[in-house]
Amino acid sequence: MVKTRFVCGDVLIHAGDITNKGTVEEFRNSAQWIREADFEVKIVIAGNHDAPLDKELYKGHTKFFHGKKVVNSDECLDLISAGGITYLDHTSKTIRLKRKNGPKTMFKVFGSARHPTNAFGWNSPFGYPANSPDDARKWWSQIPSDADVVVTHTPAKNHLDLTTHHGNIGCEYLRQALWSVRPRLSICGHVHEARGYERVIWDVDDTKPGTFGEISTTVGTLPPRESKKMSRVDLTGKTYPRLANEGPKDPARSETCFINAAILATHYPHAGGRKFNAPIVIDIDLPLDDEQEPDQN
């Protein structure tokens, strides 16, 4: 993992590949870096490089990943889920921002490392067969219908998933699940060369059930990799139109912002050396937490 420098903020989201080779030392270093980041909440999921966190698969194939030096999965999990880090393993959590002078807002987030695989077969951590619709539907039907934010390692099909050599490798059944849930944000990584953001308007016409349609996709613009400008996505209406989504209680919610937040800009074998992207900063309005009293000035 690259120890990227951040501005401070309310929520840090890491969309997987906490490590490169899945060693305890990498997990320890990454966990320390995340804990020290100046954010009230830190949300993390695994990726296909984080093999020990897929305990069942790793237990059967330790030699493939690490030879004779077996890594303790429980130790890795303890490192990445302690010290204020929220680790999501195909699970969800309601987040309440409580820091003094903070926004005092709340949201529900779902996170999963599951991804379609055919390149690596059985030894891809958190993978399911790309040619098995039943497996994909099983996993993605479990996204809560009231999720505000969905964090996955894999992109959805045709949204920030275009690779240099293998076409679009995102999951169509994740895309269909997102059509149904319509979260405010869908955040992913995995496809390094597809980093960026898109705003999707869903076709939610009740007279066309099962079509999973989209009305439009607006591709956002971020500063070039060499720029020192912040990669900011404004969904509040200050500089760009406000996101047309007031959350799961809004029957008219029709828009999701897709973000591929990959930091590593190149893919193996990294011809010409590894290159890196800046983190993406998202400005978004979230509902106030009615259980909290506002700060007294």
Image (cartoon, grey):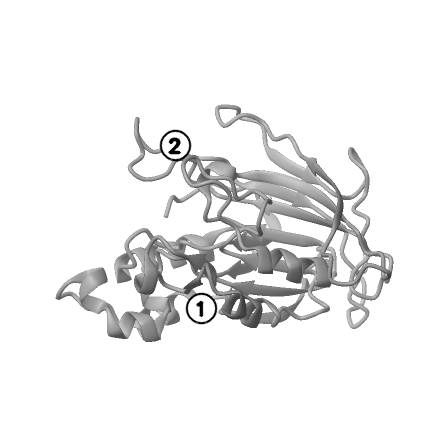
Left or right of 256 in this view: 139: left
The label shown at residue 53 is: none
Viewer-proximal residue among 175 and 11: 175
Residue 65 coordinates in the image, percent (x, y): 23, 61
Q: Is residue 105 placed above or below 262 in the rendered structure?
A: below
Residue holding disc 2: 275
Q: Residue at x 55, y 44 (%)?
A: 260
Q: Residue at x 32, y 56 (%)?
A: 120
Viewer-proximal residue among 95 and 100: 95
Residue 238 coordinates in the image, percent (x, y): 80, 37
Distance from label 2 to label 1 (Cα)? Answer: 28 Å
> Under tag 1, what secondary structure?
loop
Amino acid type for the residue under numbered disc 1: Ser
Q: Is residue 115 placed above or below 234 in the rendered structure?
A: below
Residue holding disc 1: 81
Q: Is residue 145 placed above or below 46 in the rendered structure?
A: below
Amino acid type for the residue under numbered disc 2: Lys
Residue 259 coordinates in the image, percent (x, y): 60, 45
**The C terminus lies in quadrant:** bottom right
- Point out the residue furthest to the left here: 68
Please tell me in which quadrant of the rendered image residue 11 appears. Answer: bottom right
Mark 2 vs mark 1: in front: 2
> Under tag 2, what secondary structure?
loop
Q: Residue at x 70, y 61 (%)?
A: 148
Q: Residue at x 52, y 64 (%)?
A: 112
Neighbours of disc 1 within 10 Å: few (<14), some (14-19), many (20+) = some
Q: How many numbered dots are placed on residues in this image?
A: 2
Q: Do tag 2 and tag 1 residues touch (Cβ < 8 Å)?
A: no
Left or right of 260 in this view: 256: right
